[in-house]
Amino acid sequence: MMKSVQKKWLPEPKKVAFGKSLIQLNQLGLGEKSDKEIWQLFKEGNEDALCFIYNFYVEKLYVFGHQITRNKDEIKDGIHDLFVHLKIRRKSLGNVISIKSYLYRCLWRLLQDKSKKKSTLVFEENQHLEGFAIKINAEVALIEGEAYQEKLQFLSRELNTLSKKQKQAIVHYYYEGFSHEEIAYIMGLKNKDSARKLIYRGIESLKERIG
């Protein structure tokens, strides 16, 4: 399980109650429950379930936010607004299969709205994303040796030449493990076939460049 890392910018307990660490929450058995079970507990008013959702996903959401805007304050505010919204509206929310994809979709929409107003949105079709770079795992590269490291660095450079949407879809599919349907949901695409085509075109573009 991920360790809980407290950051000064995170929502204050008085506004959103997240007082327990993941270790404490796992001791309560939350780490063994499915997304559906945790979400149901959260909707019923269980503060530990909300705390678990926050602690488990907050850092992932912060990293994801950088795919949408370069403004770090907007990302922090967006995450805060997201969890305040969840806490206030929990009883009226529907059921979810994947908490992660639901949170990503909500943050995506929140940051889109904020960024459009301030012209800081970085995801525009047919542009390359300067502030969102795919990086290799330095430790893995070190273990595998210099030749392997050079190959990964080359692949990273080529991945970062793709369009922003292609790169995001590939990250969601290969790095995050989302399905085509979840990617379409998160990115606001028409359907899962649109997500599949986006990934396919990105991979085909890579093949052409790499030769």
Image (spheres, helix red, strand yellow):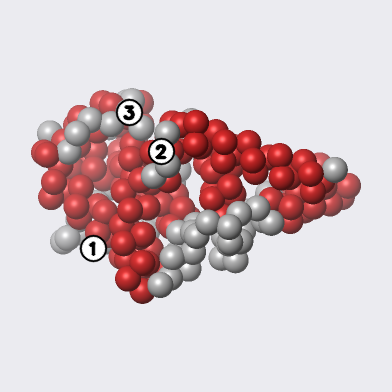
Left or right, residue 127 beside residue 75: right
Give coordinates of residue 98: x percent, y percent. 36, 32
Q: Amino acid at mark 1?
A: Glu
At x 54%, y 43%, the residue is: 169
| Residue named by callout 2 | 190
Q: Nearer the viewer, residue 83 or 180?
A: 180
In contact (CB < 8 Å): disc 3 and disc 1: no
Left or right, residue 149 beside residue 1: right
Left or right, residue 105 beside residue 153: left
| Secondary element at tag 1 | loop
Write down the quadrant of residue 72 in the picture: bottom left
| Residue named by callout 1 | 12
Mark linked to residue 97: 3
Give coordinates of residue 73: x percent, y percent. 37, 70
Q: Amino acid at mark 3?
A: Ile
For the N terminus, the quadrant is: top left
Q: Nearer the viewer, residue 131 or 43?
A: 131
Classify 10 Å Cα crowding around label 1: few (below 14), some (14-19), many (20 and above): few
For the C terminus, the quadrant is: top right
